[in-house]
């Protein structure tokens, strides 16, 4: 298993394969089927990549790690220990500096206050 892009989360799916599928067969939704987004893939298949617009956007999204496999997506989103809200753990801890397990620095502070 290889890590998917910048998320550093292992996945059975290859970003290179997803990008190749998206470039050549993305207008049929094959890239979405490969990544596990079945409903989105059916939508692209029926609309021919929404007449080419979504097809081009998805090529860029895969390249920039915005369209990721389902198995990676499930590992990214966790529930906050304080408020119970689901959040992207990678973005909150790396980008905003929130402690692991909390959706924000404020929730971490509230939990700390409750424990005293």
Image (tube, helix red, strand yellow):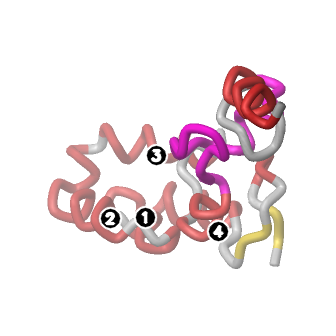
Circle number at residue 41 = 2
Nearest to N terminus: mark 3 or mark 1: 1
The CA distance from mark 4 to mark 2 is 16 Å
Which one is in front in this view, the residue at disc 1 or the one at disc 4?
1
Alpha carbons under labels 3 and 2: distance apart = 11 Å
Upstream in sequence: badge 4 or badge 2: 4
- Does residue 95 appear anywhere in the picture? no
Marks 3,4: beta carbons within 8 A: no
Which residue is farthest front?
Answer: 116
Q: Nearer the viewer, mark 4 or mark 2?
A: 2
Going 66% across and 54% down the picture, which residue do you hit? 76
In the picture of the structure, the residue carrying the numbered disc 1 is: 32
Q: Is residue 50 left or right of residue 2?
A: left
Whether 86 is among the magenta residues is yes
Q: Position of residue 99 (x, y in %)?
A: 83, 35
> Which of the 4 quarters of the picture holds residue 39?
bottom left
Judged from the image, the secondary structure of the residue bearing numbered disc 4 is helix
Q: CA distance from mark 3 to mark 1?
A: 9 Å
Image label count:
4
Question: How dense is the environment of label 4, judged by Cα within 10 Å: few (below 14), some, or many (20 and up)?
Answer: few
Q: Do the residues under discs 4 and 2 have CB atoms within 8 angstroms?
A: no
- Viewport quadrant of the C terminus: top right
Q: Residue at x 55, y 38 (%)?
A: 83
The magenta-colored residue range is 76-98
Q: Earlier in the sequence, mark 3 or mark 4?
A: 4
Residue picked out by circle 4: 17
- Is residue 43 visible in the rendered image? The answer is yes
What secondary structure is found at the residue carrying circle 1? helix
Find out whether the residues at labels 3 and 1 contact each other: C-beta distance under 8 Å. Answer: yes
Q: Position of residue 45 (x, y in %)?
A: 24, 64
The residue carrying mark 3 is 58
């Amino acid at each position: 298993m290889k890590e998917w892009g910048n998320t550093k989360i292992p996945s059975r799916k290859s970003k290179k394969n997803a990008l190749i599928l998206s470039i050549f067969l993305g207008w049929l939704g094959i890239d979405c089927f490969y990544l596990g987004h079945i409903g989105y893939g059916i939508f692209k298949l029926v609309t021919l990549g929404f007449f080419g617009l979504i097809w081009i956007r998805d090529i860029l999204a895969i390249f920039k790690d915005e369209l990721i496999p389902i198995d990676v997506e499930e590992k990214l989103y966790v529930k906050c220990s304080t408020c119970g809200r689901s959040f992207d753990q990678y973005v909150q801890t790396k980008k905003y500096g929130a402690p692991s397990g909390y959706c924000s620095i404020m929730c971490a502070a509230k939990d700390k206050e409750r424990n005293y």
